Every structure is written in structure tokens, then in C-alpha cells.
Image (tube, rainbow, N blue to C red):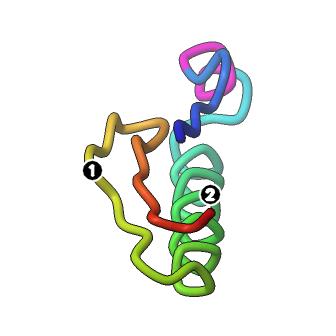
Amino acid sequence: MFTDIVGSAALQERLGTSAYTKFVTRHDKVVEECLDEVPGARILNETGDGFQLRSRWR
């Protein structure tokens, strides 16, 4: 599975660096909290504005 903040460069420009950093930090926390709920789930790769994730959940 992948997550991606679509239009991240434009979003950063619109929000400003500080607000954008807070936004991405919240995104990362939400993803990590969700992964905690799925047995065997883990982050394979972090792209800066998203993740590549893996899970054995069926």
C-alpha cells in the first residue's frame, strides 16, 4: 500500500514551511497509529511525503 500527499510542493508553498511540517508530521503519526492496529504491518520506504507499506493482513 502507498500513501502520498498529492501536490505536496504546492501545499508547502501555500501553507508555509512551518504549517506544512506540522501537517506532514500529523500524516506520519496517523499512518503509524494505523499500522499499530494491523498485525505484521510495517513501513518499507518513506518518500518524504508518503510511505510504502506492507502488511500480512488478509
Quarter of the rendering containing residue 56: bottom left
Mark 1 to mark 2 CA distance (whole Å): 16 Å
**Label number found at residue 27:** 2
Under mark 2, the amino acid is His
Could you say whether the residue bearing mark 2 is in a helix, strand or loop? helix
Quadrant position of the C terminus in the picture: bottom right
Could you say whether the residue bearing mark 1 is in a helix, strand or loop? strand
Q: Which mark is nearer the camera, 1 or 2?
A: 1
Residue 39 appears at what percent x and percent y?
Answer: 49, 83
Q: Residue at x 44, y 70 (%)?
A: 41
Q: On screen, 10 above or below 23?
A: above
Q: Residue at x 33, y 35 (%)?
A: 47
Residue 6 appears at what percent x and percent y?
Answer: 67, 21
Q: Main secondary structure of the magenta part?
A: helix
> Over which residues does the magenta segment extend?
9-13
How many numbered markers are drawn? Answer: 2
Depth order, front residue of 35/26:
35
Callout 1 environment at 10 Å: few (<14), some (14 to 19), or many (20+)? few
Q: Residue at x 72, y 23 (%)?
A: 14
Depth order, front residue of 32/48:
32
Q: Earlier in the sequence, mark 1 or mark 2?
A: 2
Residue occupying the far left of the picture: 45
Q: Is 10 colored magenta in this rendering?
A: yes
Residue that carries the numbered disc 1 in the rendered image: 44
Q: Is 18 colored magenta in this rendering?
A: no
Quarter of the rendering containing residue 5: top right
Q: On screen, 26 above or below 33?
A: above
Q: Residue at x 47, y 36 (%)?
A: 49
Q: On screen, 36 above or below 46?
A: below
Under mark 1, the amino acid is Leu
